[in-house]
Image (cartoon, rainbow, N blue to C red):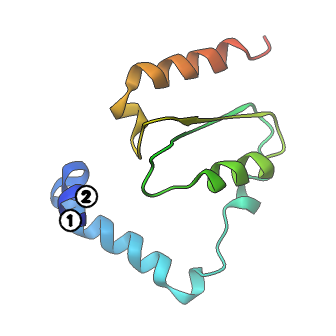
């Protein structure tokens, strides 16, 4: 049911979105890619949100981001939510974000 699920979010572009994503990840030149080095210099306060039931991401990725960045980081794995927490429970995402922002130094 992947085409139908992608279609809900990407409409007529669903197939080209999928092809761009899958062909990139299957390309041998991309095998060793890791965003860790790209994010390591980040020193700003960072909030990492992910749905607990995200079918495309893992908690290990959240943890890797937290370990990789140079600045302060807060991670939130939102129970019961999937890949689109901001759509599934916008109030919880806004509340979590507001709490994070309120805790930042002036």
Residue at (37% x, 72% y) in the render? 20
Q: Is residue 60 left or right of residue 53?
A: right
Residue drawn at point x = 57 percent, y = 15 percent: 98
Residue nearest the observer in this picture, 30 or 6: 6
Which residue is tagged 1?
A: 3
Dots 1, 2 in contact, CB < 8 A: yes
Give the percent coordinates (x, y) of residue 80. Answer: 43, 36
Question: Is 94 placed above or below 49 here?
Answer: above
Residue most extreme to the front: 80
Give the percent coordinates (x, y) of residue 93: 48, 25
Which residue is at the front of the view, 99 or 30? 99
Question: Where is 14 relative to 69, above or below?
Answer: below
- Residue 41, visible in the rendered structure: no
Secondary structure under tag 2 reads helix
Q: Residue at x 61, y 50 (%)?
A: 59
Q: Position of residue 56 (x, y in %)?
A: 45, 58
Measured from the top left, where is residue 15 in percent x and y? 23, 69
Crowd around label 1: few <14 · some 14–19 · many ≥20 (10 Å): few
Q: CA distance from mark 1 to mark 2?
A: 5 Å
The quadrant in which residue 45 appears is: top right
Q: Exactly how many numbered labels are in the figure? A: 2
Residue beneath disc 2 = 6
């Amino acid at each position: 049911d992947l085409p139908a699920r992608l279609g809900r979010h990407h409409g007529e572009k669903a197939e080209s979105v999928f092809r761009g994503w899958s062909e990139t990840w299957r390309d041998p030149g991309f095998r060793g890619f890791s965003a860790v080095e790209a994010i390591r210099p980040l020193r700003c306060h960072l909030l990492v949100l992910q749905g607990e039931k995200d079918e495309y991401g893992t908690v290990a990725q959240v943890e890797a981001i937290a370990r990789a960045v140079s600045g302060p980081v807060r991670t939130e794995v939102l129970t019961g939510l999937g890949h689109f927490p901001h759509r599934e429970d916008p109030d919880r995402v806004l509340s979590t974000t507001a709490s994070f922002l309120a805790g930042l130094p002036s």
